[in-house]
Image (spheres, rainbow, N blue to C red):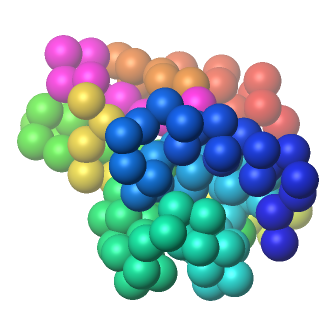
Amino acid sequence: MLSTQAIENIKKAIAKYPRKKSASMDALMIAQKECGHLTEDILLEIAHLLEMPPVQLNQVAAFYTMYNKRPVGKYHIQVCTNISCSLLGSEHIFQFFSKMLGIKKGETTSDKKFTLSEVECLGSCGTAPMMQINDDYYENLTEAKIEEILKTLK
């Protein structure tokens, strides 16, 4: 269940739009920031606040890779594998992460610190290969940069 503060934040988001359901992406992000991931109960609660069918809200949450429907680690590493990143080595970058962390795509380390995901596009094609960790972008990735980034996060 969402906290009173999260519900108030969702109501503020709703006030910015002409239709309640237009606030669906904002509401999902508010809930995810509070709870870590989106459960079915949370989706039902948000759908009720937005006065929309739960299936429509679930479609939004399923379509966008930024919404997590299962727990993720403290650091959610999302490696872009779309065309620009792919041509510039994102598959190698992904495999390097997998080896460094000892996990595969979609897995979380046993200490719950890192989750490794592959995403289709993060919109930074000019600085490929790139990734996002939580809310931060890391671009022009190399093995050396990845080692440095992981060292600061561990």
The tally of labels here is: 0
Residue 28: name its quadrant.
Answer: bottom right
Residue 139 percent across, percent down from the top left = 39, 19
Residue 76 visible in the displayed image: no
Residue 122 percent across, percent down from the top left = 32, 36
Task: Indicate whether residue 128 is drawn in magenta.
Answer: yes
Vertical side of 9 occupied by 46: above or below? below
**Image point 74% across, 64% down: which residue?**
109
Vertical side of 42 occupied by 141: above or below? above
Q: Which residues are magenta?
A: 124-135
The quadrant of the rendering that contains the N terminus is: bottom right
Task: Indicate whether residue 39 is drawn in magenta.
Answer: no
Residue 35: name its quadrant.
Answer: bottom right
Residue 148 visible in the displayed image: yes
Residue 50 percent across, percent down from the top left = 52, 62
Task: Say which of 86 and 55 sits in front.
Answer: 55
- Left or right of 45 in this view: 78: left
**Image point 36% across, 40% down: which residue?**
18
Residue 13 percent across, percent down from the top left = 57, 38
**Image point 81% across, 63% down: which residue?**
2
The quadrant of the rendering that contains the C terminus is: top right
- Left or right of 114 in this view: 145: left
- Left or right of 57 in this view: 147: right
